[in-house]
Image (cartoon, grey):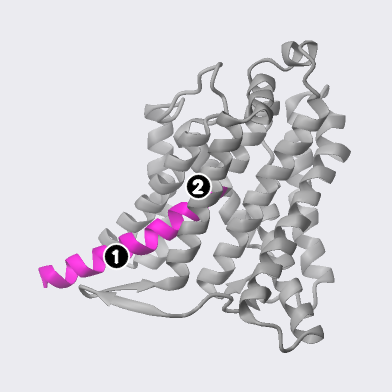
Amino acid sequence: MVIMDGVLLAQFIMNGLMLGMMYALVAVGFTLFFGVLDIIVFSHGDTVMVGAFAGLGTYVWLQSVYPDIETVWLCLWVVAASLLAVCLLGVVLARGLIMRLRSSPPLNTLLATMMLGTVLREAIRLFYPDGSNPQPFPRLLPDTSWLLGGVTVRLDSVLLFVGGLLIIGGIHVLINKTKLGMAVRAVAQDSEAAQLMGVNFSFIVLLTFALGSGVAAFAGLMNGIYYNEINFGMGVLLGAIGFSAAVIGGLGNIYGAIIGGFVFAFLQTVGAVALPFSSAYKDVFAFAVVIVLMAIRPTGFLAERSSQRV
């Protein structure tokens, strides 16, 4: 019985790694936006949902126009179209809404993005074919799996996890090793001083929103491929989890957001293993622990430092 429990725990941990990467990517977007503009974009979770539906719509269209297209090219086109569409959405959001509200009270931006999230959800529900109902998401990756010591390892989960690592590594290189990243860090530290030094503030804001939204799109694709189903309301929970991960990790710190994503997945894993009726209570348990962690350490695991906000 102990061996079975150990195998079950190992399986949950394996699944938790995949979920942790997904949550970390969502949390990184919240952190990027807060780091550069000191704002919370509550529509970010719905951006994840839009990314998943953009990928699904691209898949359906390609299958109808090019029914013989190879799976590899199909997958690449779906990912590219999803990232491009949501990056453009992020740019439009930044240009048309966020920057216009920059001089307004922070509450205005919070309310505007909250309402924008509702607009995005309802737009998908009303205008996507049969958008009110859950949509089956195609298997874009091989469904191969291996049984290692009683633990099932899915190839698609491994590939998605590696893809998430590559994205996080790319963000790290961009932020810390390039002149563009230096400009982003300068704006995050002191936007007025950065502008006096010649940094194009508007471009950096647009870049940040494109980057954060693109990362969210990949998280949406991960969700769809992993669960093989998406729905117009999926962004509400993912947004709450991503924001919670960013807060407990240290809002404004990218590496804290990543840690927070895996911590939240770990809490769900513990809840699923330790609690009765695990599937019903794992989210309740995770959010309850997050509340306690926020009370104990309000600044998060990695407290934000003014010189290293992103």
Please tell me which residue lies in front, 120 or 279: 120
In the orientation shown, which residue stands out farthest toward the left? Answer: 2
Please tell me which residue lies in front, 263 or 307: 307
The C terminus - image quarter: top right
Mark closer to the observer (2, 1)? 2
> What secondary structure characterizes most of the magenta part?
helix
Among numbered discs 2 and 1, the one appearing first in the sequence: 2
In the orientation shown, which residue stands out farthest toward the front? Answer: 178
Q: Which residue is mark 2?
A: 24
* x 61%, y 60%: residue: 220
Q: Position of residue 101 (x, y in %)?
A: 83, 29
Mark 2: amino acid:
Ala
Q: Position of residue 297 (x, y in %)?
A: 40, 27
For residue 97, what is the image quadrant? Answer: top right
Q: Magenta segment: does it hold 13?
A: yes
Q: Residues within 10 Å of mark 1 (few under 14, many from 20)?
A: few
Report if the CB atoms under discs 2 and 1 are less than 8 Å apart: no
Q: Position of residue 299 (x, y in %)?
A: 46, 25
Q: Which residue is mark 1?
A: 276
* Boundaries of the magenta span: 1-25
